[in-house]
Amino acid sequence: MKASALVILGASGDLTRRLLLPALYRLHARKLIGDLRIIGYALEKWSPERFEKHVHKALSQFVPELDEAGWNEFRARLDYRHGELKAEPLAALGDLAAAGTLFYLALPPSLFGTASEALGEAGLSSAPRGGWRRLVVEKPFGSDLASAKQLRTRMHAHWEESQILRIDHFLGKETTQNLMVFRFANRFLEPVWNAQHVSQVQITYAETLGVEKRAGYYEHAGALRDMLQNHLMQLFSLAAIEPLSTWDSEVLRDHKVEVLRSVKPFTVRNVDAHAVRGQYRGGKMDRRKVVDYRQESGVAKDSTTETFAALRLEIDSWRWQGVPFYLRSGKRLASNCSEIAVQFKRNPGALPGAVAADNNWMIFRIKPRQTMSLLANAKKPGLKLEGRRVTLSAPYEEEGNSEFSAYEQLLMDALEGDRTHFLRFDEVEWAWRLLDPVLKAWKKGEPEFYAAGSEGPSAQDRLLDSGHHWRPVRLVAGEDD
Ligand code: NDP
């Protein structure tokens, strides 16, 4: 029996093709996955040879460094079975399972409950002596608090919480992990990482893309569910957590939950003071004409789905009392920019000569390049005592596409049973608990329209404290170099 196997349910889908298979190939090429067997499972009545062709096509498209020798070794790992998400056809996978087997639900979210139950009924959630069975679940986990709880109940009928790995690929990103390393490995940062010195934190995920071909999903999700409830809430909790005394995945997740529990809750009535939504209109981007969201294929002509969402969160704790955390994400914005930006307060007292000191910013940027920058004030070279703005920047050397790297990291962690970068149910639950009033309030009314290629709806400014400004989504020359 092989030591480990990965069974991908939904192996004919987009996620498998674009992200999972390229990540698995790269792990294989780096000799990191031992004798892992990769078994595809989907409805398509393909033979294993036909699946091989499908995999080869995907790798040819998404892995530029694919070579023949590498492919010939990789293909030997592959197998395929077809069938519905029911116990009987799935039970046949038992013969292919290894001592350690990871099931990956690369399926539409509506099927997570069905698939995990069917796997359990097929006896695949119980491991042989000395082995293990784990289940990776894609996002989103539920569409509100009630549905997330229902899904948990269905999953827990056959799977222990310790077997379930809820993926949020932002947690596999270099910058996200660096946020913890940089904060906790540097003595100089901890004394100033609090309300005494920090004035505000902005977490932004902006993209130029529109809804593309995902209207079927996005119309029901919207930006709040698609980006903020999961990815940005995760970045938020990591930026705000207390230092750990023990480096342990459970302690880390306890600390993240503590942050979410300490956020001052919204009510349906005060949502406008804490949340803003927008929807893109058409226009020209990169000299290309783009249409209104409501004119996109698959979108209702009177859709009120938000393509932009912003939140203002306040943490009721000794460390963060009075510091607003602003989170926002939107489509068809001015650039592809994603970052966590921490602004420090201004220095009190007089400065020498003609020096004007601006607030310092510490920026952890995810897109367009993974970099870490400190915006600081320094002397302008010359005989006069004048100040200037300098950017101290540390870029990461990226290997290819950062999405692949995140999936490489998370697949490795899942195979090794390291749960640090996966979500425990209570993290998901507290994020929904916070956002449920916003979802309820947004069932009525309309989002504010914003022009394609802009900074987003002007209403977002109402979330800001006096003296705070949104950092521009449009990239600022010099900050990222
Ligand atoms: P797809 O729509 O491409 O479908 C995934 C798989 O589910 C396919 O194999 C599809 O089969 C199968 N499937 C669909 N309906 C059924 C059904 N009724 N019974 C059995 N199988 C079915 O989805 P994606 O691959 O895009 O997404 C999968 C998951 O990954 C989702 O939860 C998504 O949120 C998440 N995700 C996706 C990303 C992406 O870039 N695609 C990025 C991040 C997360 P068939 O091919 O026959 O339709």
Image (cartoon, rainbow, N blue to C red):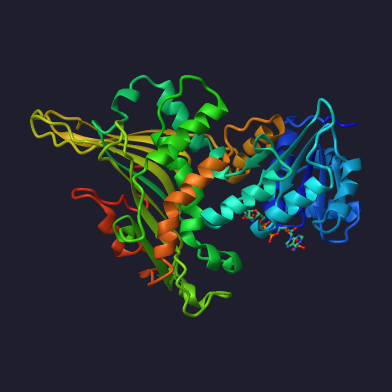
Q: Quadrant of residue 47?
A: bottom right
Residue 75 visible in this rendered orientation of the protein: yes
Q: Is residue 180 above or below residue 120?
A: above
- Position of the N terminus, as image quadrant, is top right
How many callouts does the rendering have? 0
Q: Position of residue 343 (x, y in %)?
A: 28, 39
Q: Quadrant of ligand 1?
A: bottom right
Write the residue at 74% across / 41% down: 25
Write the residue at 12% across / 28% down: 383
Instruction: Return the residue found at the far bottom.
Output: 301
Q: Is residue 293 above or below residue 141?
A: below
Q: Is residue 332 left or right of residue 61?
A: left
Q: Position of residue 419 (x, y in %)?
A: 61, 33
Residue 481 visible in this rendered orientation of the protein: no
Q: Quadrant of residue 23?
A: top right
Q: Is residue 408 left or right of residue 247?
A: right
Q: Position of residue 394 (x, y in %)?
A: 42, 32
Write the residue at 68% across / 34% down: 412
- Position of the C terminus, as image quadrant, is top left
Q: Is residue 96 above or below residue 139?
A: above
Q: Is residue 168 left or right of residue 62?
A: left
Q: Nearer the viewer, residue 223 or 55?
A: 223
Q: Position of residue 331 (x, y in %)?
A: 46, 61
Q: Nearer the viewer, residue 468 or 94?
A: 94
Q: Nearer the viewer, residue 404 or 93?
A: 93
